[in-house]
Image (cartoon, helix red, strand yellow):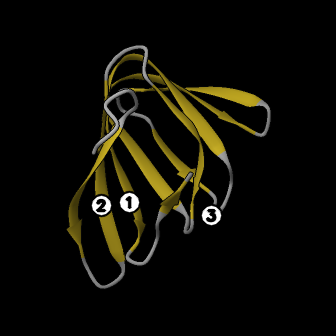
Amino acid sequence: MENTDRPQMHPLGKGEAFKLLEVNAKSGMSMPEHHATSEAVIVVKTGEAVLKMDKKEQILKSGDTIILPARKNHSLHINKDFNAIVTLAANGEIEF
């Protein structure tokens, strides 16, 4: 059963080298500490979230793009309803 208390990730497509995931979240949701097994590129389409990584916080908002290193633990708290596209290596995974 899917957990509806935290942001939802849905696959959008997969090629030979990369795959795309869509992240949707409502204001107030949080994604616990996790990491990707490959570098990840996040493109924020709408909303706002706080990314916590290395004891620092960064606001992610509509139009922002960020590259996260592979296996770098981080968490996300949603301030405003949020939608983003995440690009990973085709064999990359999100691990909690």
In the rendered image, residue 78, in percent from the top left (x then y), is placed at 45, 21
How many other residues sit within 10 Å of disc 3, few (<14), some (14-19) or many (≥20)?
some
Mark 3: which amino acid?
A: Ala
Please give left or right for residue 18 compared with residue 42 in the image. Answer: left
Instruction: Check disc 3 and report its element: helix, strand or loop.
Output: loop
In the rendered image, residue 53, in percent from the top left (x then y), is placed at 70, 38
How far apart marks 1 and 2 lie (CA) works out to 5 Å
Position of the N terminus, as image quadrant, is top left
How far apart marks 1 and 3 lie (CA) works out to 12 Å
Residue 21 against residue 19 in the figure, above or below = above
Residue at 38%, 27% (x, y): give it.
Answer: 5
In the rendered structure, find residue 20 and report the number of the disc placed on it: 2
Residue at 64%, 42% (x, y): give it.
Answer: 74
Q: Residue furthest front?
A: 1
Mark 1: which amino acid?
A: Thr
Residue at 37%, 76% (x, y): give it.
Answer: 90
Q: Nearer the viewer, residue 8 or 61?
A: 8
How far apart marks 2 and 3 lie (CA) works out to 16 Å
